Image (cartoon, coloured by chain):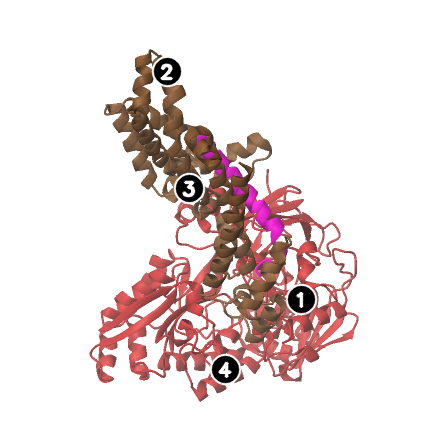
Amino acid sequence: MLGFLAKRIALAIVTLFILSLIVFFAAQVLPGDPAREVLGPLAAKSAVQALDKQLGTNRPVIDQYGTWLGHIVTGNFGTSTQYQSAIGPILGKALVNSLKLAALAFVIVVPLGILGGVVAALRYGTRVDRVISVFGLSATVIPEVVSGIILIAVFGLWLNILPVQATGGSGFGGTIYHLILPAIPLVLILFGYIQQMARAGTIEALNSDYARTATLKGLPRRTVIWRHILRNSLLPTITVIASQTGYLIGGLVLVEELFRWNGIGSLLYNAATKKDFPMLEAGVLVIGAAYMIVTLLADVLYSLLNPRIRVAAVE
Amino acid sequence: MRIDSRRLDAAREGRSELENHYIDELVAGRLGRREFLRRGAALGMSAGVMGAVLSACGGANKTGGAATGSSTSAGASTTPATKGGTMKLASQTPSGAINPLTVSDAGGLCMLAMTGEFLAYDNNQALQLQPMLATSWKASAGGKVWTFKIRPGVKFHDGSPLTADDVVWTIQQLADKKNASNALSTFEGVITPAGVRAVDSHTVEFHLEAANGNFPYLVSSDNYNAVIVPKGTDWGKWQKTFVGTGPFKLGSYTQNQGASFVANPDYWGGKPNLDSAQFSFYASQAPQITALSGGDVDVIVQFVAQGAQALTSGSSYNIIKLKSSNHRELSMRCDQAPFTDPRVREAVALSLDRPAMVSALLQGLGQVGNDSPFAPKFPSTNTSVPQRVQDLSKAKQLLSAAGHSHISTTLYTEQYEEIPALAQVIQQSASKIGVDIKLKVETQTAYYGKATFGQSDWLDGQMSLVDYGDRGVPNVFLEAPLTSGGPWNAAHFKNAQYDNLVKQYVAAVDLSTQKSLAGKIETLLLAQTPLVIPYFIDGLCATTKKVSGVEPTSISQIFLHKASISA
């Protein structure tokens, strides 16, 4: 197991390094200049040059990348050209915010999705199955902004039972209360995906030999499902959930803007448009690292649920 | 007008030549009372003197009251303002560090004006330049030297006293080419660091590069970077303390989140009514409107008409409308066929229905423009020049006289506020006279490019539609986009007579000279039409009915010294 982990971590580091290279050089293609982004299009040219010099953005690109790399390996995220202050605290706060929202959406959508998938599979072909599947698929295509605005209008303004902003809650309960509304669009989008995968996995498991054997052995239906079917239907679902991490943490720019929530999505969007390279790099690395961790966890969970994989790894 | 000569002569005593000139104009009836008050204030005449003159000239009427420097803000009433309380405001997220040297966005400059103060205050509701950290100012040497008297007894938030040295240092830093200063675009060519001198502990002299009749505006709240800070301040660290002289001190500032300010009990103008002001930052307008509707905030510092029907229709909120010179400029390349012929340019201008644009694009919250930077709000605007109106048949005539039956061109513009919609309206109007416009709407970064000729769609496009934010005086609008060699001259307009007229206008210190030059400039621009300015957009601020005494400006500052909120 340890060897497996060590190999995965080494791979992750290599991937992150390549990722940082790609992002840095791809971002050079973007139009705009960091100092001019700060001072605006109408500022005097001498001022822009002076600021570029101050920020160090007039040096050759390789130079800038080298300095940045040197800082990162010592844990120094550098200084943002936009905010002219250390990136660490800003990024940290944004990451924590994004994780909170992602966690709440996750906690709601995963059990719901799995439940929906299993129930639909057990009632395969009936109206219940069709209703759940159609609902799930339709909800997926509604853009977060659209569902978000409708939710704000109905629950926030008209019924006035939920707050219209994600910021403002204090303490655990307060934070959850404020995050319910923003989490719902995410739940709607992901529910269909997870539900379909769970449904497919469960159907396959239901039609398998071992399930038939277990039933013929005389085990009650509930036990068959709980001990044999579920762990197999969960396997594809885990993979799907892990692949949505990037979106849940870093892809929520619109939701963050609509509900006024300072997450990493809007931070990165601003960094990209304002050519704030240090911030962009740091943010992408953090999301990349999160992705690596989650997929690693998914793999570990996979092998826990599926002894065949566990045995293969050991061998 | 019944004139009390004795009192008038007494009032005239000690007045400078220029001030006497204004009094002459008032007596002769060429200057209205309001204009006199406005111009007198800009020159630095005190309220007492102006009141004395007015009363000598046939009785000071109600407008005399406005000269005392109090604003005619919405909600100013005779009932005493509620003391205490916290006001919650929604404003645009500052796009970068709050560094007075480098701030260039609406959110950032709003923050600067919360704790920082300027030499003069451009009161957008009274349309008057009022004393702030300077108590008076006067011009000499024909407008080439300006002397400002600094208010005594003012303390910074850190306890140190305000002296002329602080003023001199601040302005020198802002005008220094070696600094990354956003204010250079205002000061370049007007003043250099060497021209700023302290005469004594409370007097500062500005020796300008050339005579400039509107200089006081350049060190007023209009020049939003020019907050006066203690000498030797580390600009990069100003964000941690927000040290200034204003009625509010910094409570806390959190990037991308919000800021809080607490009342400064030692403020020179008296403790403010409010205990504190809390700002929440928003990336866009829609959540601000939701927040106001939901009661999360009491004030939206600035908003635009599109998408704000929830605020402007009905009467649940107080909408403060500010006359502003915020506008859009459609430039046509005067050095590229077919726009080399002024008849073609005039034809395009004649195809537009301006009043319809104001009502459709701005919901009526704006004023029609006459293709020159002289907005109705400027006192020097010459209103005797006839307003251009839509005339499709004349436009077609001009086009065929110029030898064109059909023209194709491309219009470059930016994705910003109502500008894409305006571009479409222009496209539709122009198609009616045979001008086919292809639209290229880009992001702001792509459109501005490097903001230099040859590297910017804004400056190079054959037709280019750009936004210009509000200013207190038209100088910048007259020079940068239209003079030969102006850095923002997207129209590539080169007209020696125009350059000459503008030079005279900038140097002119008295109003009637400015007005007559303005008339000549407006007429020239109508004849040549290097650019089309279809309208000027009102500045808008929204508050709940519980709020009173706020003083917003059309560049999105908000002054809360006199503000109060009822429970």
**Quadrant containing the C terminus of chain B in the rendered view:** top right
Badge 2 and badge 1 in a common chain: no
Q: Which residue is mark 4?
A: B502
Q: Residues within 10 Å of mark 2 (few under 14, many from 20)?
A: few
Q: Colour of chain B?
A: red
Residue A74 appears left or right of B474? right
| Residue A114 image position (x, y, % from top left) | 38, 28
Residue toward you, B311 or A245: A245
Q: Up-down: is B170 above or below B478?
A: above
Residue drawn 30% across the image and 36% down it: A137
Circle 2 or circle 1, nearest the eye? 2
Q: Which residue is mark 2?
A: A222
Whether pointer 4 and pointer 1 mark residues with C-beta atoms closer than 8 Å, the reply is no
Q: Chain of mark 2?
A: A
Q: Up-down: is B385 above or below B316?
A: below
Residue type pointed to by label 4: Val
**Residues drawn in magenta:** A80-108
Q: Which residue is mark 3?
A: A243
Q: Main secondary structure of the magenta part?
A: helix
Secondary element under disc 1, as helix, strand or loop, is loop
The mark that comes first in sequence, 3 or 2, is: 2
Q: Is residue A93 magenta?
A: yes
Q: Identify the chain drawn in brown.
A: A
Label 4 and label 3: CA atoms lie apart by 63 Å
Badge 3 and badge 2 in a common chain: yes
| Residue B360 image position (x, y, % from top left) | 33, 57
Residue B353 appears left or right of B4? left
Secondary element under disc 2, as helix, strand or loop, is helix
Q: Residues within 10 Å of mark 1 (few under 14, many from 20)?
A: many
Label 3 and label 2: CA atoms lie apart by 30 Å
Whether pointer 2 and pointer 1 mark residues with C-beta atoms closer than 8 Å, the reply is no
Q: Chain of mark 3?
A: A
